[in-house]
Image: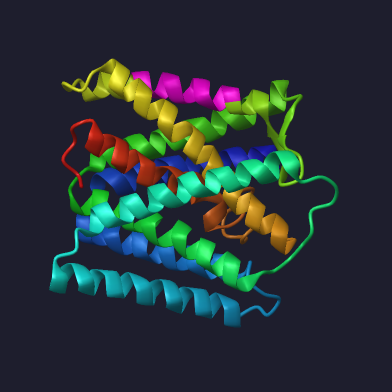
Amino acid sequence: MERTRFVTALFLGLFALAVLFWLPAPMLVTLMLVMAGMSAWEWGGLLGTDYRAPRLGMLVLSAGIGGLLMIGRMQAGIPLCAFLAITGGVWWCAFSVYLYYHLHQISGEFRHRRDSLWSAGAGLLVLIPGFGALICLTVEGQRFLLSALIFLVATTDSCAYLCGKRWGRHQMAPVISPGKTWEGAIGGLAGAVVTALIIALIAADDKGLFLWLGIGLMVAPFSMIGDLTVSYFKRRSGIKDTGRLLPGHGGMLDRIDGILGAVSVYMIALSMLGWNIL
């Protein structure tokens, strides 16, 4: 299992680098839309016991709202990237408080409840701002910033997993995700700090080392919250993995949850620190 997970992670990393730096922007946007559709399909599996109807419903609803937002941008001049980033940022900050309550105050066995309306609404707030923000970075030609985000999230996730497996003693979310520990979270933050230092050296821009450190320390917690959020809704539905797409890693959502959790806050932070992306 560990070997399969490692091989899959290595393949995904190499594939992501190749896609980010060599794929033309229109094809990259198309790939992101396909990934968004796959994620919506998987999220639909958290809504009900029937296999197809909730999945199709989530897919159609996500596509419809995304299409309406694009029409609003073209017809009314809505600043779509800013709208998506702010919507996502507000959602993740609010849900972090909600999740904190569940991490610390729920006791006993977690009740498996498929509250379709609540789960569907949460899914839309995870998927649409998240993928919309990723597409905005791509359309704006910010390949380096996009790759920096993926690098930060991947390092945070890997360091949290390895440190938790080696030194983990105190569970972070015993009811929602028993495998996650506070020691792993500290390891993830340390990994983000090291990664931010590397990014700052590679970027060699006028933003400075400490700004990238701040961004890294902001991205890492929201990346973990994104991971915990998908785990929370899987636990509610009694599902271990959102899919079987990736050996040792589950479905698409299981791999990009951290990116979806971090990208909106990442874009807001970049904009506040001087990058012209919103």
* Depicted 142 relative to depicted 114: above or below: above
Looking at the figure, which quarter contains the N terminus? top right
Residue name at image x 75 percent, y 26 percent = 170
Residue name at image x 36 percent, y 54 percent = 87
Looking at the image, can residue 178 be seen?
A: no
Asked whether 140 or 255 is in front, the reply is: 140
Total number of numbered discs in the rendering: 0
Residue 95 covered by magenta stretch = no
Query: Residue 199: x, y in percent?
Result: 31, 25
Q: Which region is colored magenta?
A: 186-197
Q: Kindly report the secondary structure that dominates the magenta region of the rendered protein.
A: helix
Query: Residue 131: x, y in percent?
Result: 37, 57
* Depicted 276 relative to depicted 66: above or below: above
Residue 50 occupies quadrant: bottom right
Looking at the image, can residue 255 be seen?
A: yes
Residue 177 horizontal side relative to residue 268, left or right: right
Q: Specify the farthest residue to the bottom.
A: 53
Residue name at image x 59 percent, y 65 percent = 119
Residue name at image x 64 percent, y 48 percent = 248
Query: Residue 148: x, y in percent?
Result: 33, 34
Query: Residue 68: x, y in percent?
Result: 29, 75
Asked whether 161 or 79 is in front, the reply is: 79
Residue 190 covered by magenta stretch = yes
Residue 200 horizontal side relative to residue 235, left or right: left
Coloring applied to the structure: rainbow
